Amino acid sequence: MDNTLSFLVRGKYALFTDPFSKIGGDKSSYPVPTYEALKGIMKSVYWKPTLIWIVKRVRILNPIRMESKGVKPLRMNGVGKDRYTLAYYNYLENPAYQVEVKFIWNEFRGPEYVSDRIDGKHYTIAKNMIRKGGRRDIFLGTRECQGCVEPCTFGEGQGHYDNSGRNDLGVMFHSFAYPDETGVEELRTRFWRPVMQDGVIEFPAPDECDPAMSRFIRKMKAVPLKSCGLGEESLRHELD
């Protein structure tokens, strides 16, 4: 089974933070969503430890426009009037994207999840969750940028960048490599060079990313779900 689904996600603002913009305390968004952000949106719609969501491609529907806002983020170790500092965040205005995803089985979870690998079950639930707007709140990059999802057919309708040709977007963050999805006890970041062709960005799968553009962050171990407060009864319920 192909396990491919499509959805439309939109909101008033989005902030897919460019890590280089955080050095001075301000934040600026990438012009397009990252793989990790879109994967996080789908995990808010529907997620089980049995599966891993793979983002295949995204279509940019609205013009890429930025809006700068003055904000007062919390200051680390701040007290009283000094609890807040001043910063400028550059948000994407009126973002809308068509996203195509699929799921694969997580081979790095325990054998207790093997019996839960039922394509039709998870495909149907995920499709219903998209129709209902997701199980959890949807955020476009950061928590203050709330969004909504709905079903769509990828490529349907008119997009601002249709027939716009090729646009190279430079080096961008792709995703995190977590130990519970790689089997390696370390946390890494992946970067890549995206190309937008007629408004569509095709994402490489995590294992297809260039290893030369991956960076080690720190050692990390996958935490068993039982250690996160899921007892045996909860675990059995999760598999039902």
Image (spheres, rainbow, N blue to C red):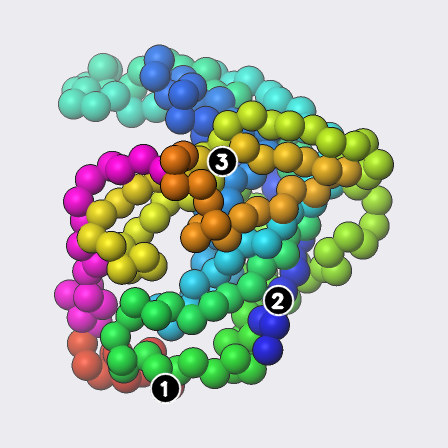
Distance from disc 1 to disc 3, alpha carbons, whole Å, reads 35 Å
Distance from disc 2 to disc 1, alpha carbons, whole Å, reads 21 Å
Q: Which amino acid does label 2 sit on?
A: Thr
Identify the residue under disc 1. Answer: 115
Q: Which amino acid does label 3 sit on?
A: Trp
Q: Residue 4 carries which label?
A: 2
Q: Can residue 32 be seen in this view?
A: yes
- Residue 198 placement (x, y as % from top left): 77, 38
Q: In which quarter of the image is residue 179?
A: bottom left
**Residue 215 is one of the magenta-drawn residues:** yes
- The magenta region covers 214-230
Identify the residue under disc 3. Answer: 192
Q: Is residue 41 visible?
A: no
Q: Quadrant of the N terminus?
A: bottom right
**Residue 171 is one of the magenta-drawn residues:** no
Q: Which mark is residue 74?
A: none
